[in-house]
Amino acid sequence: MNFKSLFDETIVGISTALEKGAVSIIRLSGNNSIDLVNKVFKGKNLLNAKSHTITYGHIYDSKNDKIIDEVLVSIFRSPRSYTKEDVVEINCHGGILVTNIIFNLLVELGARIAEPGEFTKRAFFNGRIDLTKAEAVMDVIDAENKKALDVANSTMNGSIKKVVLSLQERLINIIAQINVNIDYPEYDDVEQLENEVIKPEIKKIKIETEEIINRAKDVFKIKSGINTVIVGKPNVGKSSLMNALLSENKAIVTSVPGTTRDAIEAKLNLGTITLNLIDTAGVRETEDVVEKIGVQITKEKIANADLLLAMFDGNKELTEEDYDILEQIKDKKHISIINKSDLEQKIDITKLDKYIYVSAKTQDNLDALEKEILNIVISKDFDPSKTSYISNARQLNCMQKAKEALDIALESIENQVDIDIIELYLKDAWFNLGSIIGNVEDDDLLDNLFSKFCLGK
């Protein structure tokens, strides 16, 4: 795809949701954007407007000789704009009809309808942002909790780019030393160069890539939600707890054991993080065919959970079913929840760890449960303001490939492979790191990435 020829065109898109609201924003980018809007604008001459100014006026349909809407027009002249091109934003009233009429007027005058993400794509190709910042734009929009937003903003500020460029620079220094040796073999002893200079530095870079890869696990959980499974024997209050946490009657609650036959799922935003909350069928031996299937599903959910909320009836002594659940969860992240704290307590708490008393019925102590969940699922040193985090599968894949190339380079040194072959693996690692921030020429990859953006962005 010839991006340069595409960028010669002026594009137009609706940047706000196409629904009734107070204001709609129609955005244009390209060399002719100011001139095109000026042709439908009644007010001061926009061609004389300074950058980063707002001009009051009206959108005028000259063909039908009528005023369409009262508007504010923002001018951002190149290169001080989102795309580094001339950008115009028309703030009109937020009706669907009036927004579409203004949009169509601009298309009739020659503006091309923008593809999804094309404004951000232009910002990338014009050098205003790197690929990680482009992806962070969508992460900001998609963020469902504060932690996810913190990570997105950290990436927007260039945290990952700085780390990647630093790692690339160190690899280039190693490659340069290898090339000096290849060009001037008498300059250094090859074995000494490999073992005393190159090998230790490659190890350091590899360790840093591993740390970045490991930290990504927290980010993915934060972005997609923590898979949190509520488990327990029948009738301990699992569904009541789910309803209390969600503040809605998501699950059916009765006094009949075995009411929940299948897993019931819902999202719970705790502000800082999001839980993918799963209420499961009670774990017990049963002859009921349908309930058996539900119990099997519960066991599968337990195996794949990030966090388990194991519920026990505080008003009763622990049973064999309870002990079976404790055995299943002992090696996984979990919180033992003693329900029915409003009743007389008969449970033996010495058999439990990390337990919290709650009453799903009266919703007592649920805030303490939420705090404990946060303490368990998020690393205490998780801090996007101080540490860089990879934020999506594409970036992680590139980092993993870079790490694999470094592994092979180290193995090659151990096996005394020719140094020029080792250089190839280091170049491969360098290339994969560069792919994270967009030092690539893969049109299909970029088309696919930006197509996931919303229109007008």
Image (tube, rainbow, N blue to C red):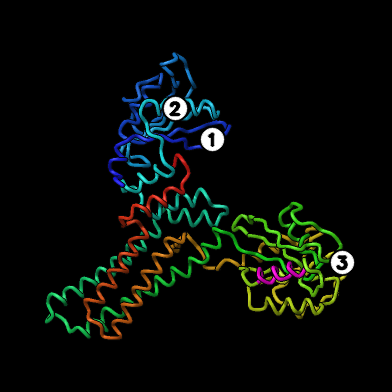
Q: Pointers 2 and 1 in contact (CB under 8 A)?
A: no
Task: Give the secondary structure at mark 2.
Answer: helix
How much space separates mark 3 and mark 1, taking CA atoms? 53 Å
N-terminal of the pair, mark 2 or mark 1, is: 1
Which amino acid type is shown beneath numbered disc 3? Answer: Leu
Residue 407: quadrant of the picture = bottom left
Q: Is residue 182 left or right of residue 301?
A: left
Which amino acid type is shown beneath numbered disc 2? Answer: Asn
Q: Residue at x 69, y 72 (%)?
A: 299
Residue 126 forms part of the magenta stretch = no
Q: Is residue 195 left or right of residue 388?
A: left
Residue holding disc 2: 104
How much space separates mark 2 and mark 1, taking CA atoms? 14 Å
Residue holding disc 1: 18
Which amino acid type is shown beneath numbered disc 1? Answer: Leu
| Mark 2 Cα-neighbour bin, 10 Å: few <14, some 14–19, many ≥20 | some
N-terminal of the pair, mark 3 or mark 1, is: 1
